[in-house]
Image: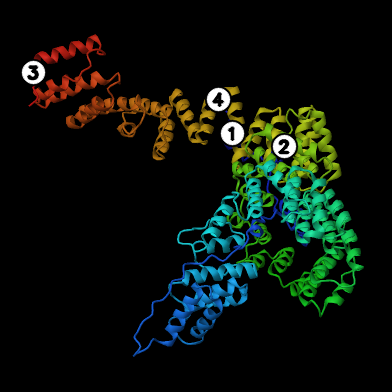
Amino acid sequence: MWKLIRLFSLLLCGLFLVSADIKKEFDVSVQLIGKSTEEKPKLLPPETLQIQEDKSINLSYRLLEPPDKLEQTQIKPLKEEGGISCGEPKDRTSYRLGVDYYLEGKYGPAKEELSKVVAMPSPFKPMAEYVLGVIYAKEGKEDKALELFSDSCKYSHMYQKASCESYYALSFKLTGRVPQNKDPMWEAVANIKSGIISKPSCTDAVFKEYCQYVLEFYEGKEGNKYTDSLRLRKAIVLYQKGKTLQAEEIFKEYSTPAKPYRDIALYYLGVISAERGDNKGALSYASILETINPPLSENLYGIVSSKNVLLSRLTYSITGDKRFLDRAGIIAYNSGDYRLAVYNFLESGNVLYAVYSYIKLGEYAKAYELLRQKNRKSKEEYQWYLESAYWSDKSLEPILDEIRDRYPDLYREYTGWFYFKKGDWDKAVIYLDDPYYKALAYFNMKDYNQVLQLLQNRNSLKERLLKAKSALFLGDTKLARSFLTEKGDEELYLIGLSYFLEGNYQASIHYFNSISQNSPLKPKALLKLGDALYNEGKLDLAKEYYYQVLSNYPNSEYAKYATLALIGMGGKEIGDKQMETLLENYLKNYPNSPMSDELRYQLAKTYIKSGQEEKAKAILIELMNSPLKYKAILELAHLERDPGKKAVLLYKVYKEGNAQERKQARDELIEFYTQVGDKKSIADLLAEGEDEDKVKAIGIYMSLGDDQDAQRLAKALMQKRYRTQEFETYLLELYKTSQDRSYLDYLKLSKDPQIRPQALYLSALDYLKENEKRKALEDLVDITVNHKDSPLYNKAVIEGAKVLIELNAKRDASCFLEKANLETASKEELSVINSLRRELPKCEVR
């Protein structure tokens, strides 16, 4: 047997290397920004420009006509009061006479008497005002009537409702609007005129005929009066219900020059044409409306022009109105055709929107030139002037001089960016007032704590991203995630990186996979997907992602990293000769790469595989002082022909390497000792391994008759509460050879349905030897209660009955025997059971 533990002090080996398995580590600086500083965020134009949307107008309100006559309530005469002696009050007399004259049709004397009442303070004044208003209305003096009705409406009297309705009716007729009111009918009239189609209530209405008209108007029905109004209202209701053809017939009827409401008819015909896609027809109607009703014409032009760029330009060619050129530009801009948008904006003279379009195209120099030629610039235009100068490498200083006093905030900000671009972070921090930009300068100074402090209570997207990156640079992954949502690609990427840094690869895979296909972060995400899968051991899937990077982004920096990853993996996808060439070329091109030691080790393994052992040894010796020494020793052990030296090399790694290296060395030593048949050394090595290896060691020790080492390991595992069926089976065997009941006590707690009843049965027998009958009985009862399917069940019943007999509990023993399973009992057990029954009294349950 090899005694290499003793030999090791005599045979020291000086060849030390590490395995070539390349762990996909997280390089924060590369993964986050790929360079030493983050650039100034670009000022972005709006994603879409607001377009004034022209919608069709409901012109029903224009069709509602005022009453064609004054409907009045019944005016009642006043009876004469008082005798000749006391006389009648003057106001009452004048009111009575005035009403009488009115009822007789004598309007002159009636007005004279009623005017006297109106001129004096009198309870008859409101009623006199109403009657006088009716007379003036009949005479065509509607302004005077309106004034009287208005005043009469304010007071409570028998004609108040009639006064109010007359006031609303004359107001509508003379001014075109209805005063705000709460009358069930006239409130609906006021609403309709304001564009809200409401249903009137005609109950108790004074203007009953007019109310019937308003109700028909609301319902879209035709009537005997106000025929044009009602017929066109019906057409609008039909149009609104989608009955376009029926509506169109009526509109055409009213589209001729002699018809009333011709402009409304023409407008709706234009709207219907536009909705049908008959843009030529719609434009024709709009053209006719230009002279009849310019606002409706303009709205109709707007409806047609909003459909696409071509129609907007066609509308411009008809009207000469440059706002339609602007609209053409906006439609092009919002659809992503920025080149067409520029063309239209330049023609319309909209410099700012043209600049937006140039910026969207990335043509900062053209945006700069356009703004340079503009004499008078707004603040926003100056901002884009500075922005376009910054990104087109033009001088900022002349522009800054122009705005120093006019726009000091812009001056400070872009002076800060001026220094930012030069890399003068200290000065940039002085001028940048905005916390985010200031924090960005600190970020580029690598002062990440200052970034977090400055942005502590700020939570815009860009600020959260900067805080998350700073937290990742500081190594605080949970803090980084607290700043992030799952809404954008960059946030998803950073969340994925945070989980990758923690080693939670499943979570990182989920987030990297969520990044959209066209995102600029996609190649980095694919790389990290490959790395995460690699670290999970899913090599075939990892290779797919690395090759996807090589295929989709062959000339990018990410292709270099993907190549490196594949080199690290090797495998079936890369042949030995191709791997050798890849490694040699990479090491030649990047000799100072931080991966050079690992790749040289890989190359050594490739040489070994192809039979070039001398080349391999030369590389391993060169790497003697590298951190890869123990894995290199393993490779040298593979090359070693001398069994003694081979074992020494493996023991060197086993005693000094890391856990993974030690395990590999131990496995190889076990294999080595297996080949030479040295079971004791195999057991000794297994005894120093994981718990399952210790169990195997126990089995080997027992097979060698080395119960002392077997029991030592068993006690250690029992101390750790270790349990497997194999281990517990060995414990049963150890009890049988040692009679150490601590094994039984341990096994009685087993959950294995085969092991536990054996332990209980052996424990009972052990207690009986010690004359501890009651303890024995407890174990036997446990078997009969909890392990009825055990082969030891009937034996436990028999032994339990015997114990009860010895305890002079014969009736209990008889009842205990009743538990026996006669169907599964052996002949011997049946014989014993029957024999005991003959000696015992009958079981009677009290």
Label 2 – label 1 distance at C-alpha: 35 Å
Camera sees residue 42: no
Give the residue at mark 3: 842
Q: Are marks 2 and 4 in contact (CB under 8 Å)?
A: no
| Discs 1/4, front | 1
Residue 842 percent across, percent down from the top left = 8, 18
Q: Along the polypeptide, which appears first: circle 2 or circle 4?
A: 2
Camera sees residue 242: yes
Q: Quadrant of the N terminus?
A: top right
Give the residue at mark 1: 666
Is 100 situated above or below 272? below
Q: Along the polypeptide, which appears first: circle 2 or circle 1?
A: 2
Label 3 – label 1 distance at C-alpha: 66 Å
Give the residue at mark 2: 545
Q: Along the polypeptide, which appears first: circle 1 or circle 4?
A: 1
| Discs 4/3, front | 3
| Discs 2/1, front | 2
Give the residue at mark 4: 678
